[in-house]
């Protein structure tokens, strides 16, 4: 299993103009199964967006993503598998996330109704802030593009 640093060097060899280090490395979701399933959607070109509870960022003190960030995406076992570039970030209330963003996330049948059900359940079960789900909770909607994928 390559380290993030080894993976990044391989990506830098394949993609011109990558900086010396990625912004960060992380996995989608809260379980290894989530990570693998969502990564598969990214690698297939289906998933070009993600959403996070702003409250979780506030609770953990993690840095908010910004347009231009380059992230190494890990699979469920922690193996680096892809590099994405954040193209846009916006914060909106949960009940104002639109159908276009829901479609970009690539989950379920890609409808807004499915997105709402999936994410309400996710944040109710895996939220890190200790705050209960709320229809007006602030959601960080992030769009990204796949820059590099490991074929190993």
Image: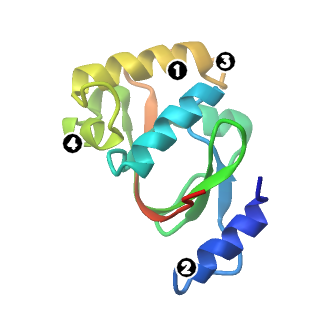
Mark 4 Cα shell of 10 Å, populated few (<14), some (14-19), many (≥20): few
- Residue 141 visible in this rendered orientation of the protein: no
Question: Which residue is tagged 4?
Answer: 100
What's the distance in space between the residues labelled 1 and 3, CA to CA?
Answer: 10 Å
Above or below residue 41? Residue 13 is: below
Above or below residue 98? Residue 63 is: below
What's the distance in space between the residues labelled 2 and 3, CA to CA?
Answer: 42 Å
**Camera-side residue of 16 and 64:** 16
Question: Which residue is tagged 3?
Answer: 130
What's the distance in space between the residues labelled 1 and 2, CA to CA?
Answer: 36 Å
Question: Which circle, 1 or 3, is nearer the viewer?
Answer: 1
Please tell me whether mark 1 sits on a helix, a strand or a loop.
helix
CB atoms at circles 3 and 4 under 8 Å apart?
A: no
Question: Which residue is tagged 1?
Answer: 123
Please tell me whether mark 4 sits on a helix, a strand or a loop.
helix
Q: Residue at x 65, y 65 (%)?
A: 23
Question: Which circle, 1 or 2, is nearer the viewer?
Answer: 2
**Camera-side residue of 112 and 7:** 7
Residue 14 — which label? 2
Question: Which circle, 4 or 2, is nearer the viewer?
Answer: 2
Is tag 1's residue or tag 2's residue first in the polypeptide sequence?
2
CB atoms at circles 2 and 3 under 8 Å apart?
A: no
């Amino acid at each position: 299993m390559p380290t993030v640093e080894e993976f990044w060097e391989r990506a830098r060899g394949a993609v011109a103009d990558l900086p010396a280090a990625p912004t960060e490395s992380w996995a989608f979701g809260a379980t290894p199964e989530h990570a693998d399933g969502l990564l598969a959607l990214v690698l297939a070109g289906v998933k070009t967006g993600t959403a996070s509870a702003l409250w979780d960022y506030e609770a953990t003190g993690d840095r908010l993503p910004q347009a231009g960030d380059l992230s190494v995406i890990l699979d469920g076992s922690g193996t680096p598998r892809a590099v994405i570039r954040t193209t846009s970030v916006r914060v909106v209330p949960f009940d104002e996330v639109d159908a276009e963003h829901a479609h970009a996330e690539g989950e379920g049948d890609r409808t807004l109704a499915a997105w709402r059900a999936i994410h309400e359940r996710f944040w109710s079960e895996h939220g890190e802030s200790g705050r209960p789900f709320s229809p007006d909770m602030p959601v960080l909607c992030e769009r990204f593009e796949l820059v590099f994928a490991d074929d190993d």
